[in-house]
Image: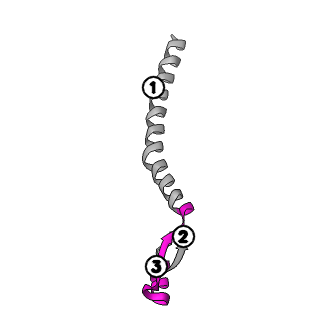
Amino acid sequence: MNLIVRDLYNKWDTVLKEEFGDTITIAVDKFHAVGRVQKRLYANVYVSIRNEYRAKAAVIEDEVLKKKMN
């Protein structure tokens, strides 16, 4: 078996299969796979949590400022 490790650019699959047919196995390198997972986690989890806490902090800050002005 011939193994080819590639990045996540999907067009590589087409080119490699056209060139080598079924004589190869295509795998994605760990660096790019982990990077994609991290980006999705960041976008879907971290950003929403950060925005939620920013909104709460803004409310608290407004309340503190109002108390100082009174």
Kind of element beneath mark 2: loop
Question: Alpha-carbon distance for marks 2 and 3?
Answer: 10 Å
Q: Amino acid at mark 1?
A: Val
Q: Amino acid at mark 2?
A: Asp
**Where is residue 68, by image quadrant?**
top right
C-beta proximity under 8 Å, tags 3 and 1? no
Report x, y in % for residue 66.
49, 16
Report x, y in % for residue 9.
50, 72
* Residue at 48 percent of width and 75 percent of height: 26
Residue, disc 2: 7
* Residue at 54 percent of width and 70 percent of height: 7
Q: Name which of mark 3 and mark 1 comes first in the sequence.
A: 3
Residue 58 belongs to magenta span: no
Residue, far front:
1
* Stretch in magenta: 11-32
Report x, y in % for residue 35.
53, 57
2 w.r.t. 31: above or below: below
Q: Amino acid at mark 3?
A: Asp
Residue, disc 1: 59
C-beta proximity under 8 Å, tags 2 and 1? no
10 w.r.t. 47: above or below: below
Residue, disc 3: 13
Question: Alpha-carbon distance for marks 3 and 1?
Answer: 51 Å
